[in-house]
Image (spheres, grey):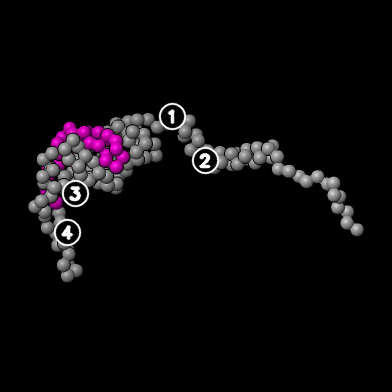
Amino acid sequence: MNNNNIYQEKKHFTAVDVLIVFSVLVLIATLIFRTQLISLFNDSSKRADCEIYFVCESVPNEISAQIKDGSKLYWVESDTSIGKLTVTSQFSPSVVYTSEDDTLYIDYSETASTFTGKIDAAAVSNNGCYLNGTDFIAPGMTITVSTEYAQFEILVTDIKFI
């Protein structure tokens, strides 16, 4: 004989059950991401002056005359101001690499120049370098910058906090 009672109540998932499950998920997420949560409320990141060193491997000679010390630089991709430019080397002809018959030849360009420089900036140092607190920049990045009259690409080589 079957002992099933047709009047037996079915269990329902109530709002209290949902609240308990949600609380457990929040507790687990808090445990996993506790360092990020602590750093969110911790004021360990301070804005500090820094020097961003770079090399510009190829800029057309027509533009090189427009690149001057003291010019304000803007990071084109991030649409943000970086700081003031200081040219640290003379403009010299760019190196051009060509390959023929599995032989690499090195020539110097007559139409493009190379130079190195430094940008005086202010950034937040918090497990990296953040310009304006949000735009991450690091050595090895190639970014497009512009002055008032010229736009060119630079390769960031070093960042030093002062």
Q: Residue at x 15, y 35 (%)?
A: 69
Which amino acid lies under the numbered mark 2 shown in the image of this protein? Phe
Residue 19 in sight = yes
Q: Residue at x 10, y 51 (%)?
A: 111
| Disc 4: which residue | 97
Q: Residue at x 18, y 35 (%)?
A: 148
Instruction: Give the secondary structure at mark 3.
Output: strand
State the CA–CA distance, disc 4 to disc 3: 12 Å
Labelled disc at residue 57: 3
Residue placed furthest toward the left: 110
90 inside magenta stretch: yes
Q: Quadrant of the N terminus?
A: bottom right
Which of the marked residues, 4 or 3, is nearer the chain's N terminus?
A: 3
Labelled disc at residue 33: 2
Which of the marked residues, 3 or 2, is nearer the chain's N terminus?
A: 2
Q: In the rendering, at what x and y percent does residue 127 appear?
A: 39, 39
| Disc 1: which residue | 43
Q: Residues within 10 Å of mark 4 (few under 14, many from 20)?
A: few
In this rendered view, identify the residue nearer to me: 1 or 94: 1
Which amino acid lies under the numbered mark 1 shown in the image of this protein? Asp
The stretch of residues the image draws in magenta is 67-94
Which amino acid lies under the numbered mark 3 shown in the image of this protein? Glu
